[in-house]
Image (tube, rainbow, N blue to C red):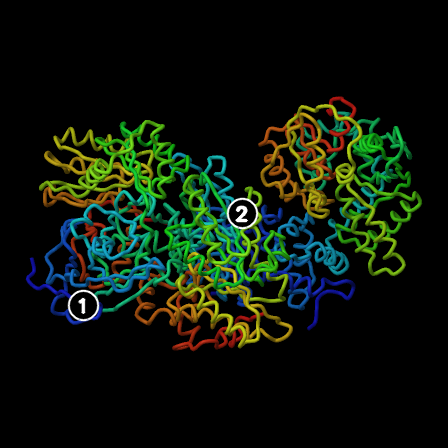
Amino acid sequence: MPTTRFTPSDVDELRAVLADTTASHPRLLVEGAGTAATTGGRPDPADAVVDTTGLSGVLRYNPADMTVAVRAGTPLTQVQAELAGQRVAFDPARGRRGATVGGLLATADGGPARQQFGVLRDLVIGATVVLADGTVAHSGGHVIKNVAGYDLAKLFHGSLGTLGVVAEVVLRLHPLPRHVVTVAVPGPAEEATRTGTDLLGRGIEPAALEWTPDSGLLVRLEGTEEGVLARAGAVEAVGGTILSDDAQAAAWAGVDAVADPAAPGTTVLRAGTLPSDGPGFVATLAAAAARAGADLAVSSGVGTGVHTVALTGGDHAAVLAAAHAAAGPAVTVLRHDGLDPDAPLWGPPPAAVALLRAVKQRFDPTGRFGAGRLSPWLAPVRDVPATEGVPA
Amino acid sequence: MSTSFDARRPPQREVLDDCVHCGFCLPTCPTYAVTGTETESPRGRIYLMDLAAQGTIGVDEAFGEHIDSCLGCLACVTACPSGVQYDRLIESVRPQVERNVTRSRADRLFRGLVFALFPYPNRLRVAALGGLVYQRSGLRALVRRLGLLDRLPARLRALESLLPPVTVRALLARTPERTRPPGAARLRVGLLAGCAQRVFFGDVNAATVRVLAAEGCDVLVPRDVQCCGALSVHAGREDEGLARARATIEMFERYRLDVVVANVAGCGSTLKEYGALLADDPAWAERAAAFSATVRDVTELLAELTPQAPRHPVAARVAYHDACHLANAQRVREQPRAVLRAIPGLQLQDVAEAELCCGSAGIYNLVQPVTAEELGQRKAANLEAVAPDVVVTANAGCLLQIRRFLDAGIPVLHPVQLVDASIRGCDPV
Amino acid sequence: MDRVALQAELVAALGADAVLTDPVSLRAYECDGLTGYRVVPACVVLPRDTAQVAAAVRVCARNGVPFVARGAGTGLSGGALPVADGVVISLQRLRAVVSVDPVNRRAVVEPGVTNLDISRAVAAHGLYFAPDPSSQQVCTIGGNVAENSGGAHCLKYGFTVHHIHEIEVVLPDGTVTTLGGPAPHQGGYDLLGAFIGSEGTLGIVTRITVKLLPRPAAVQTLVADFPSVEQAGDTVTAIVAAGIVPAAVEMMDALAIEAVEAAVSAGYSRDTAAALIVELDGPPAEVTAQFAEVERLCHEHGTTKVHVAPTPEARAAVWKGRKAAFAAVGRISPNYFVQDGVVPRTRLAEALTRIGELADEAGLRVANVFHAGDGNLHPLVLYSEARGEHERAEHLSSSIAELCVDLGGSLSGEHGIGTDKACSMPRQYDDADLATMTLLRRAFDPDDVCNPGKLLPTPRLCGERPGPHRPHPLEAAGLIERI
């Protein structure tokens, strides 16, 4: 680990740190709360760490406009705590461990609320980023509807600290629901997918629709009390049981535990598939895990086709290989504690890998940021077949 | 500012200025649907008219091509939120093109042939008899079998295939000059027998007369062989069209009618337009306006009259096709549907792309056969998609065009024929 | 490059029927929905498929010829304005709905399909495409992707960027690639998100996988009349503060209502200062409960009349009126500019007051139509070319856009920057912001051939630091003209 650690507390300090250290500390590692230190790669040794946790605090909260501007190093939980009757409609598992807003953006993390509200790409309406040479750039603003200019926040979504440092973020807010109920419908993945598709088609509008083998299909309903109860009744009619408050909390904690497990030596990956391919994908991974002697925990967004898989024990590389084979570039390794240090974390590159590299080259031409992350897509090695665009 | 139009009724500046270039007309325009080119859209055509009015471009062949290609279906007028009177624009620009653009020899000859034939029922009847011989004698089958058809120019091919399956009896049938209602007459009604209509659709005229009489109308059908001028007006042959308008007014005035009925949408819309067309003619303006005020489409009149003849059930799924000159030019959409819905047992189906023209549009399918064919096929596919027992439409051109492309097992009728069948309690087909 | 040689190369690549070269046809492409800027292109091509789009782009790239993609040409910011000596690539022959997957609630469509036709094509499955710009019956999905279109219902449902899974793109060098994927989780930068809303400057979208939503189980719409625009604005704030997220909240002032009623007779009251349209949709019990609350809030804030649309047909009439508003203004004014600024919702009343003052100063009328729920204003500046009011109107329109930025909002909520506002961008973003945006542009388009001159200010077009309301330099140079 490098010994030098910069902890700027506002955009100006961050700009100065980056601008002043291009020669002295050419290679930097951006770090937030450290809750996703191993996501998406194995960072190469750097000359210094840029610690964003000092960039903390709510800058401007406009409850009537339902927007909040925060420094990117602010923990999500702290943002939520400062809102009155409102929320950032975003529930990533590692939020409870103090993950920062900027870190959650850079890792493209998300939770079950993805079903209705999406993830930070969908909730961020403005961003301030600082580039390798200290350039401070804004995009978006403080209004929800805004198409002026390119949306740099999207570009930084999933960038894993390879393009620059996210300094400030403006978020759109949603009202806190007056009433929340979770209905559990037991059954295997195929049945959950069928039930979920049916419920969506009937306009039930679930806030979350997540399946785990233990809980079955969890249908989270938010709204007015009478509205929620009416919809809960419809879910009960297809075999569901309304969970008590405690059972509800336990069930969602179980979903969180897949994405952010406490056990050491765990590998966690996230993958996207067509929703209807979800059960097959989960079965493929379960079979691979059984062959490799690994225990597999899974939670699947039935409406979104986003699956989170945790592996303990056994050989994780074989299961990851099966995931890469089935879901290609839509697989991210959130934690690789159970993998060998040289096991490849990324699968086949996306069709647009040449564009990823071009963006990286333009934004960070000297390669200051995040070496080792998003590798080998950004730094190609010979044996990775590129499926990038070919002239038609 | 110099203009490229001549001084005779050029498009009016105020009407051109109404267009704000929003493009709401694009999806309703049949030629745009087929080609996707801006110049084949109402917005593009208005833009070119505007440029010509400013003298930026000339009124030449390149310009005329885009005006000629307009079907005149006027779906754009219905769609336009700014109220652009495209009908007025195209009707003033077509004569400009007729006068100022030199057409190719082949084009002139073909147009000459069409206008020497269609407005003249007796000539048309002779031609149709020839066609009948051609169809019946096996000559048509032979021509088709030998693939000779494919060697004909597209326009002649269109003419060939539009020939409806007619019988000698139907061809020679004449509608009686006066038909009295069974009881006291509610109205004294004149029916325009039409030119192509009376040759090819004598049965529609007969059904119209029966239905109107059954509903208490004293029905008069002038014997004069008189084209109303619709084909000429829609093609920009202004002088010819106006002469026919005057003669038609004169003809009907002799009968002292309450209502003049048309059962061909294209004719009806022109009859209703006489007032506007002759507005500049001091000797005729008032007469024409008074005449136009008495004109109704047959479905419009039936919807106004409280039914007195009992209707028998007609158990059929019916797809109704809006003829452009009824729906857009006359804004008659609900009345034919209401008249059909009043028939017990009849199920009226909604059809996709209902606003899209079938490609007939006066003589369009003869002079622009490629576009017309694509539109005809598209219309037929949309109609077939609702699996109708019968397709109905209130315009002779549409009847011919749809008949050509629709599955031969589905009859194509005029709505009044269904009403007639319902009143008489017989099978409409 | 020599125009004739370029045309010949395009004809060789695409076939003669896909290339328009005659001067009359080219004139028809000289502007889009914003007719104030006009540039005649060297050539227009109408490819039929992705391969033909790529072929056309490769011809351009090889010769360094700029190209501009064009959909239905309804854009209001001059985003599809041709480049002189450049090529316009019209996508109006890519109009297929390729496939519909009702189980996974998505459809694959070509870019020339209209927004409304997507919903029509999937209606049988109880699904629809949520973004609904007012021009939805004519604007194309390709244009929606380019502009990140919103519409009346984006308050609840978001913008185009929230409703696209995957796009196939022809990049400015003529290669074909794919952005996004089957699920919302994909590895790497969100290039899909960055591309959507890039106004045709990063490439040409040739195939789109759109997300479809189930038709809401219940929909309720009301129109509430208010004696003042301010009271209507306060009502919006109260509704949102109550924790209600309506599907849509729209407002029209008296002048806009007059135009709409003249055009489509939608049933709005002609004698009210402001009409507020509130639509709720979702599960029936939620809608019923919240609708009662919305009605109560309208009354609390002084509504003079609440009209609840009793049937789907009545609701359609309300929306038909609202969506026809821009074009309908043609009925009450010979000419007008549509503005598209955004202010924070809490500053709506302030913005409207200032707009009224600015209009009075200019001696012109302004009709206001806006998406009140998200603070997106569409002031319509009415003027008469014949009375020589053009310049004053243009000045007023730009002042309104800049007012929005000054109030903490944005130059554009949905119409885009395009040609019209490129030179105003420095009002909202500083040099470093714009330079950073240029990095993204150059990553996609290193040679600046893809819709150049749009979205970002360029020194050539805007001068070193544009002040407001100068004549467009292209205009001064006689390269473009205004009407």
Instruction: Pick the residue in front: A113 or C8.
Output: A113
Q: Crowdedness of circle 1 by 10 Å Cα count: few (<14), some, many (20+)? A: many
* Chain under numbered label 1: A
Q: Percent from the top left, x then y, of residue B335?
A: 71, 39
In this picture, residue B195 sits left or right of residue A215: right
Name which residue lies at 65% across and 57% down: B83
Instruction: Pick the residue in front: C24 or B421.
Output: B421
| Residue C142 is at least partly visible in this image | no
In this picture, residue B125 sits left or right of residue A18: right
Q: Marks 2 and 1: same chain?
A: no
Q: Which residue is mark 2?
A: C308
Q: Percent from the top left, x then y, of residue C315?
A: 54, 46
- Please state which amino acid type lies under the numbered disc 1: Leu
Name which residue lies at 37% across and 49% down: C162
- Please state which amino acid type lies under the numbered disc 2: Val
SS for dot 2? strand
Q: In the rendered image, which quarter is residue C407 located in?
A: bottom left
| Residue A122 is at least partly visible in this image | yes
The answer for how far apart the CA atoms under marks 2 and 1 are is 58 Å
Name which residue lies at 58% across and 51% down: B26
Name which residue lies at 84% across and 39% down: B191
Q: Which residue is mark 1?
A: A18
Quadrant where the N terminus of chain B is found in the figure:
bottom right
Q: Percent from the top left, x then y, of residue B40?
A: 61, 52
SS for dot 1? helix
* Chain under numbered label 2: C
